[in-house]
Amino acid sequence: MKKLFKKGYWVMMAVLIGSMIAFGLLAFFIPEKPYYIIPVPVAFLVPIILEFSCEKIYNAEERKRELTEARGAYEQYIQDLKSSLASCEIDSASKRKALKTECTARLEKQAKPYNTISTNAYNILVGVPIGAIVSAIMYENNDSAALTQIVGLIMFGLLIIGFSKAFKTLTYYSDGHFKDRYLLEVLNELEYAED
């Protein structure tokens, strides 16, 4: 990191950190006076300058060496992926495409029932009661018992959605679907590398 960036980058990072510290100190110690607003534009300006500086903040030789190393590591990774798949007799684009389709179908099949439960719970137990609360507010209906029941219904709907997401995550790992996700990402990476 020290060799990769020029001194200007480190100065801008110091200014950014200093402005954030100054904001915190001024807001904490002098909250009644708006001095803490002064460092805010600096904190927004530094990232914008860094964004427009692009390659100018790097030392050219170190950046070139880093990119060469990253490219070499990526190409080695792709070769390792191809050899691993070839050892399982998946050695053509058509076989990889069929495997990708199977992975996608398995992931969709695993997620579908939980997504259906979450969607229905939201529509019936959250969306409709929120509409009822809005209409009660619009028509100034202040029946506290009814409003309490509606809020309880919304909370029950959110509880069902939470349990659905928790079970979805649990079965994702317990049934090994994370392996399908990883394989799908590998196949997508190979497809990207060949393009």
Image (cartoon, rainbow, N blue to C red):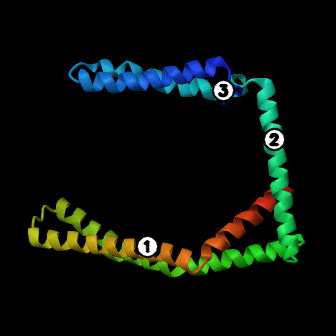
- Would residue 59 be visible to someone looking at this image? yes
- Would residue 119 be visible to someone looking at this image? no
Q: Where is residue 34 in the image (x, y as percent from the top left)?
A: 28, 20
* Viewer-closest of 172 and 143: 172
On the image, which quarter does residue 137 sit in? bottom left
Mark toward the start of the polypeptide (1 vs 2)? 2
Q: Where is residue 4 in the image (x, y as percent from the top left)?
A: 71, 28
Quarter of the rendering occupied by the C terminus: bottom right
The secondary structure type at the circle numbered 2 is helix
Q: For marks 1 and 2, give the CA distance.
A: 41 Å
Q: Where is residue 131 in the image (x, y as percent from the top left)?
A: 28, 67
Mark toward the start of the polypeptide (3 vs 1)? 3
Q: Name the residue under label 2.
A: 69
- The label nearer to you, 3 versus 1, is 3
The residue that appears at 80% across and 77% down in the rendered structure is: 98
The residue that appears at 23% across and 24% down in the rendered structure is: 31
Q: Which amino acid does label 3 sit on?
A: Lys
Q: For marks 3 and 1, give the CA distance.
A: 43 Å
Residue at the farthest front position: 2
Q: What residue type is labelled 2?
A: Glu
Q: Do the residues under discs 2 and 3 have CB atoms within 8 angstroms?
A: no
Q: Mark 3 points at which residue?
A: 2
Q: Mark 1 points at which residue?
A: 166
